[in-house]
Image: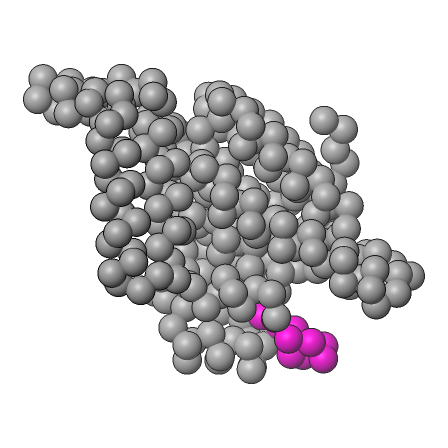
Amino acid sequence: MELSCVLYETGDGVATVTLNRPERRNALSTQLLRELLTALGAAKDDPEVRVVILTGAGDKAFCAGADLGGIAAGAGPIELHEERRHFVEVFRLITRLGKPVIGCINGHALAGGFGLALTCDLLVAADTATFGTPEINVGLWPMMIMAIIGRNLPRKRAMELYMTGERIDAPTALSWGLVNRVVPLAEVRQAAWELARGLTEKSPLLMRLGRDAFFAIEDLDFDSALNVLHSQLTVLTLSEDAAEGTRAFLEKRAPRFTGR
């Protein structure tokens, strides 16, 4: 892959995808979004990759949101509408990746960057990170990312962020349930890596089935959700990894998962 706005590295079952525009606080330009889709697609298709870490270059910002001057500069309204579809494609691809995605939040995660962070399954944040939707302060509104924020925050918390444009710090984000861990900035990448390596030891098949089921029932009523989960449980228990997990438990040893 020839990428300039995104860095892509793999090793030990982990793909690290880095937003690489630190001079622009890793803002989401059209090119960056296209490259992000390419990198995430590569991680999805690589059977050696079991976990993805998504982070930003530098130590100031994970992602400051959309690059207001770099989204199809000079394009007309219809072209802009189509270019913004890349945001939608990124959010959908992460949801359908079939592999855990850990957000390593190395700095500010604002606007679209906040939405991108919340699309990750787990978040490890630096204690210097902040989160928010400042769009209201520049005459905009966080339209698309409301679909993500609304699945992570209670209504009143979400509306407070939308309407005030104020930021919250990492400890507050932790208390609100938005992030899983807060660590010193100097330790954030290592903490995310250690979490990722732990997940690589789980069955990739069961991880995919469970993660897919999680998203499948998100908007279903209770009875419909139970029907989906009932069928998925049967599929899961027919796998070799499920049988291996049971044997390992009974034999008091670590399981050897093969992804089948």
Image position of 212 (left or right of 234) = right
Is residue 223 something that shows in the picture?
yes
Question: Looking at the image, which residue is at 54% across and 68% down?
Answer: 146
Question: At which x and y percent is residue 156?
Answer: 41, 80
Q: Which residues are magenta?
A: 132-142
Question: As rendered, which of 253 and 84 lies closer to the eye?
Answer: 84
Hey, which residue is sitting farthest left in the picture?
250
Residue 212's place in the image compared with 137, above or below, is: above
Question: Looking at the image, which residue is at 37% across and 29% down?
Answer: 204
87 is within the stretch colored magenta: no
Residue 106's place in the image compared with 43, above or below, is: below
Image position of 157 (left or right of 225) = right
Is residue 109 something that shows in the picture?
no
Question: Looking at the image, which residue is at 45% across and 37% down?
Answer: 98
Question: Looking at the image, which residue is at 62% across and 60% down?
Answer: 112
The N terminus sits in image quarter: top right
Question: At which x and y percent is residue 247?
Answer: 14, 20
Colouring style: one colour
The C terminus sits in image quarter: top left
Question: As rendered, which of 169 and 138 lies closer to the eye?
Answer: 138
Q: How many marks?
A: 0
Question: At which x and y percent is residue 9?
Answer: 60, 27
Residue 15's place in the image compared with 135, above or below, is: above
Hey, which residue is sitting farthest right in the picture?
74
137 is within the stretch colored magenta: yes
Image position of 165 (left or right of 206) = right
Question: At which x and y percent is residue 186?
Answer: 50, 43
